[in-house]
Amino acid sequence: MPVFPIVIVRKQDCRQGISWIIQGHQFSKIEMFAFTHPDQSEEMHQKMLEIEEHIYQDLGFHIRWLILQW
C-alpha cells in the first residue's frame, strides 16, 4: 500500500483588497519504536537515527535534524 503525505488546506480571510487565500501545509515523517533495556537506550537511539537517515536518503528527501531538549 503506497504512503501519501498528509496535506492540510484551509481558507483564510486576509487584508483589504484580497478576499481570501489558500494555505497548504505538508507533513511527512517516519516513526520508529524500540523496546530496550535502559542501559542500551542511547545505543538504540543512535542506531535508529542512522536507519532513518538511510531511509530518507534512499527516498531522495532533504532532511534537517532538530535536537529538542527539555
Image: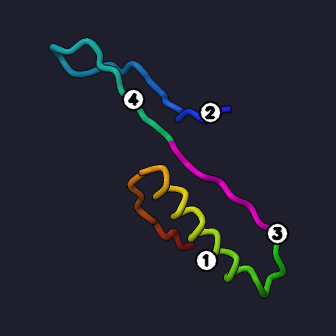
Q: CA distance from mark 1 to mark 2?
A: 28 Å
The answer to whether marks 1 and 3 mark residues whose Cβ atoms lie closer than 8 Å is no
Tell me which segment is drawn in magenta.
28-35
Q: Which residue position is annotated with label 1? A: 46
SS assignment at label 2: loop
SS assignment at label 4: strand
The answer to whether marks 1 and 4 mark residues whose Cβ atoms lie closer than 8 Å is no
From the viewer's side, name the closer residue of 13 and 51: 51
Q: CA distance from mark 4 to mark 3?
A: 36 Å
Classify 29 as above or below 37. Answer: above
Q: Which residue position is annotated with label 4? A: 24
Three-letter code, disc 2: Pro
Three-letter code, disc 3: Phe
Q: CA distance from mark 2 to mark 3?
A: 27 Å
From the viewer's side, name the closer residue of 4 and 25: 4
For this orientation, the residue located farthest to the bottom is: 39
Q: CA distance from mark 2 to mark 4?
A: 21 Å
Say left or right for 12 vs 4: left
Residue 30 numbered mark, or none: none
Q: Nearer the viewer, mark 1 or mark 2?
A: 2
Q: Which residue position is annotated with label 3? A: 35
Q: Earlier in the sequence, mark 1 or mark 4?
A: 4
For this orientation, the residue located farthest to the front is: 58
Q: Earlier in the sequence, mark 4 or mark 3?
A: 4
